[in-house]
Image: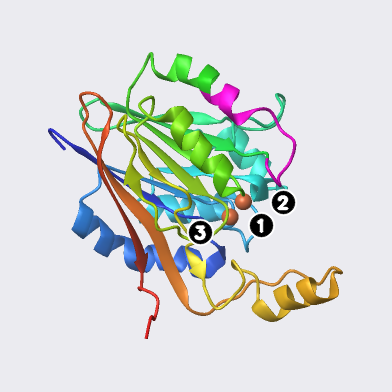
Amino acid sequence: MGNKIDILFIGDIVGDCGIKAVEEKLPTLIEKYKPDFIVANGENAASGKGLTEAEANQLFSFGVDILTSGNHVWDNWKSKPLLSSNEKVIRPLNYPPGNAGRGYTFFSLDDAQEIAVLNLQGRTYMQAIDCPFRSADNALKSIQERTNIIIVDFHADASAEKVAMGWHLDGKVSAVIGTHTHIQTADACILPQGSAYITDVGMTGPYDSVVGLKKEIALKRFIFQTPFKYELATDDVRLCGVNITINPIDGKALSIESFMLPEPKKS
Ligand SMILES: [Fe+2]
Ligand SMILES: [Fe+2]
């Protein structure tokens, strides 16, 4: 660590094959980036729908420190007790008060330096929950009293809403990392006031699919416009993420690098 902190962020882990990809590929990433801290989005870890103690414990055993989530965390009834009992698993802060779990958490590095992880969810094309922008502002008042190293998982559908959040939080947090759409965007950057940003970090799961769903089923849903049973795909599994390097003095990001393992075939 010393004069920099490296943080790995792994995108939406989908099903058992996504969990296996983390198990297989994380050691290589740890060797390459030597991260001080690893955060992953686990909203789809339990067969695509939610996250239970079993998947969370597996991911923690591989070296993940904090798990974030999103809309799909509520699809599995076993997610709620996990959210209520484990401070290392969070869900979007801006769901109505009274829901299980918490929207941000703190992690202590060896030298007592704290890192905060804040999970927010967008509203465009998603549930009409509380305003993520005002929720972020309110949470930052408390978070910034403890640390200026702040990683935000913004779980949102519309790229415009994600870009807007990037501008809203630029200079106030270390990184705004988009999740939910499962497709990695090519816009990883450091914003002018020093926050790392990417619209979507991408999926850790099967790419022979439509964002994780078996492609034959997804096509039927689009073509026939009626429900077809949800089934996860299993092939062409890749891991997507970013490594963010942060200056621990001011919490600003020094660099962000996105990766997809293995890289997609382009010729
Ligand atoms: Fe997801
Ligand atoms: Fe989602």
Q: Which residues are drawn in magenta? A: 124-136
Q: Number of callouts in the render?
A: 3
Q: Secondary structure at mark 2?
A: helix
Residue type at mark 2 is Asp
What percent of the width, then of the height, locates residue 252? Answer: 27, 31
**Secondary structure predominantly adopted by residues drawn in magenta:** loop
Task: Give the residue at x 47% y 49%.
Answer: 199
Residue type at mark 1 is Lys
Q: Which residue is mark 3?
A: 13
Q: Is residue 155 visible?
A: no
Quick check: marks 2 and 1 in contact, CB under 8 Å? yes
Q: Is residue 3 left or right of residue 103?
A: left
Task: Give the residue at x 71% y 33%.
Answer: 129
Q: Which image quadrant is residue 46 in?
A: bottom right
Task: Give the residue at x 35% y 26%.
Answer: 171
Q: Which residue is mark 2?
A: 75
Q: Which is nearer the N-term, disc 2 or disc 3?
A: 3
Q: Which is nearer the N-term, disc 3 or disc 1?
A: 3
Q: Which residue is mark 1?
A: 49
User: Within 10 angstroms of label 3, few (less than 14), some, or many (20 or more) residues?
Assistant: many
Q: Is residue 29 visible?
A: yes
Residue type at mark 3 is Ile
Residue 233, compared with residue 31, is above or below; it is below
What percent of the width, then of the height, locates residue 49? Answer: 66, 57
Instruction: Tell me, yes or no, whether the highlighted magenta stretch contains residue 8.
Output: no
Q: Which is nearer the N-term, disc 2 or disc 1?
A: 1
